[in-house]
Amino acid sequence: MVNPRIKNMEEFAAVSGLSRPTVSKYFNDPASVRPSTRQRIEQALDEYDYHPNIYAMNQNRKLTKNIGIVVPYLADPFFAEIARNIEERCIAAGFRPTMFSSYGDPAQEIEILHLLRSLKPAGVLLAPLGRSSDKLEIEKFCKDVPTVLFDSNLEGIGAAFVGSDNYSFVNQTVEYLTRVGEPPLFFEMRTPANPNANKRRNAYIEVMERLGHEPKIVKIDGEGWAFEEIGKRGALAFLAEGKLTTDAILCSNDRLAIGFLAAAYELGIRVGRTPDCSLRLASNDDHPFARFTCPSLTTAAHDYESVSSVSVEKMLQLIESGGKLPSRDEQLFAARLVLRNSA
Amino acid sequence: MVNPRIKNMEEFAAVSGLSRPTVSKYFNDPASVRPSTRQRIEQALDEYDYHPNIYAMNQNRKLTKNIGIVVPYLADPFFAEIARNIEERCIAAGFRPTMFSSYGDPAQEIEILHLLRSLKPAGVLLAPLGRSSDKLEIEKFCKDVPTVLFDSNLEGIGAAFVGSDNYSFVNQTVEYLTRVGEPPLFFEMRTPANPNANKRRNAYIEVMERLGHEPKIVKIDGEGWAFEEIGKRGALAFLAEGKLTTDAILCSNDRLAIGFLAAAYELGIRVGRTPDCSLRLASNDDHPFARFTCPSLTTAAHDYESVSSVSVEKMLQLIESGGKLPSRDEQLFAARLVLRNSA
DNA sequence: ATTAAAAATTTACGCGTGATAATATTTTTG
DNA sequence: CAAAAATATTATCACGCGTAAATTTTTAAT
């Protein structure tokens, strides 16, 4: 490694005693050269410090090894966690993932797609903002760049969608809550950014009616992505009203529930399933922090593993087949009910 | 925009009635061409859909507009938040930041630096893993690429360091805790990954001695980045021993404190400063979730704004001056004590 | 108006790699 | 051991742009 600097592939080919095209082939696919040749290259790679120039490589290549991962809000541990999982799998598959977050801003989401376009990625994994997304622009993007949507669906857009079955989430939490006590009230934001929220509300109504209970929904105000704060304020206001008609509450998502628990704690309302508690609270997502709330949060867990692995698989499949899939398929994964202490 | 496709800068220069190098100059700095020329280019830009090829641009350029942002663990909301802040500022300064996370793995940290090297970034903002970092490799990297360290310092490495003054953190929390009650015990991991942890412990000892109290430290076992879990287990074990000699505890960082609070809640130990509480708990960092713990967490807050803005400023300054600064300077920002309900 | 200086533009060349076709070499097979 | 198949080499071109030097145009000064 202390040997004279290697400037380019030409020089590196020289010191390894091969021609440049052969070395080029090796870098594009090490298995495409004879084992003996491969050995010579890898030996030279040990002795000399050479890395192909990324920009020169990608400039004239039909398809780069880049993968774009786009999420709505990377500072949300839920997305951070799933992005981490996906990133890892892309690297394992020999690709170079880059992460992007639109931080809740539709304009930035589109900007990211523009940037991504000029990055000529082999594929993109996109968790769109949802309601506020510029669907026309995203649709245009998906026509040019092989894209798999995950987490939140935009009807008909992208080559495939991989996400969670919201009905399964709510069905399990509602059934559990009603089985061990009174039927739950549904606690959500009035204008949720994420389309999953709407599906969850509808599922709640459907499941409640099936079970012969009247659905009751509390809608709280708030904009943006500070869900804990919104949930806390909403819960403080709601609990202060004293109109609680049941002992059970189902939050649309864990971040609202975290805010709710903070509010309940401040008001001295004990939450849990033990006799000393006046309220049971369940939620959906299994946020990374749900295990550390007080009390720990009973919630319907995403199948993180399946969602991330199948998203990546779909994407690789899409790349293999040249960017087009015969038909857009949607794959949904059921929740796993995680019983903790809040309900 | 419906006009014939523009393939490259040559064609775009043609339709705007200019030569390619002139157009090239415009894209590198719109102010470097005559206003009348600029107008012609921007008009053509409206009519035709052309974007310069990123790879071709960067291949033959001495300095790209890329900025690398590297953090130890992006799924930690603290780093996610500060990375978001830094990212935004880089974009505002006309650069193209890319975020990387080593997810606690020293090998991956080095891999990221290797990748970054071939990305030829104008500068890098690096929050190193700390104790486990491969310091020799990082030092080598910093010699070739203009790098500013932030959050956790590696002595003598990088062109500058911007972080928080750990003494100020601990000084404020200890002083506050002793002022309103018994002197605190220090709760930390036995082998902390982050060098800030060591500085905080030393500061705790120093401040306690200055105030005439005997420092008492509880070291808990655990490896990796699941601090809440480690804190919770450690607290459960510690509280079960019943060797609590004081009513006040200072956690090394908020994530440990979050775990501690979860443990206390499960054990039925009320934490806070009201008469019905048996324990006061304070911490350091002002983690984004510290407002939503039960009780809400009294903590010494990082000056997020200053750390991120000065980091970026230092970096821009470094780029301006051609990658070298006259001397390595370290800039530390004091904490702001945030009083909430836990102490 | 003339001319020198400054600014803007054009000419000409190079960057490091991918890709392809024709040829040469090596390895495998019958 | 010869023929066939697989692999490597040689020789070129293409890619889309940056950049220094040369040239033209514009501006400022006389």
Image (cartoon, coloured by chain):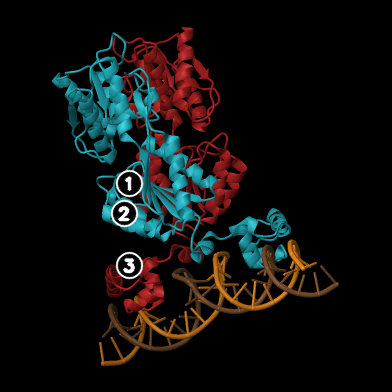
Chain colours: A red, B cyan, C brown, D orange
Q: Chain of mark 1?
A: B
Category of crowding for the residue at label 2, using alpha-carbon neighbours closer than 10 angstroms: few (below 14), some (14–19), many (at least 20): many
Amino acid at pointer 1: Pro
Marks 3/1: CA distance? 24 Å
Amino acid at pointer 3: Asp
Amino acid at pointer 2: Ile
For the C terminus of chain B, give its image quadrant.
Answer: top left
Residue A34 drawn above or below residue B110: below
Task: Measuring from the top left, give residue A80's x and y in whole percent.
Answer: 40, 39
Label 2 vs label 3, nearer the camera: 2
Question: Which residue, given by chain and number where applicable, does mark 3 sit on?
Answer: A49
When asked about the image quadrant of residue B182, the answer is: top left
Q: Residue drawn at (57%, 51%), measured in percent from left and top? A: A143
Task: Measuring from the top left, give residue A325's x and y in whole percent.
Answer: 50, 52
Looking at the image, tell me whether mark 1 or mark 2 is earlier in sequence order: 1
Question: Which residue, given by chain and number where applicable, does mark 2 sit on?
Answer: B138
**Disc sitting over residue B234 in the figure:** none
Q: Is residue A250 left or right of residue A15?
A: right
| Residue B194 appears anywhere in the view | no
Q: Chain of mark 2?
A: B
| Contact, mark 1 vs mark 2 (Cβ under 8 Å) | yes
Question: Which residue, given by chain and number where applicable, does mark 1 sit on?
Answer: B128
- What kind of element bears circle 1? loop
Task: Measuring from the top left, give residue A260's x and y in whole percent.
Answer: 42, 19
When asked about the image quadrant of residue D17, the answer is: bottom right
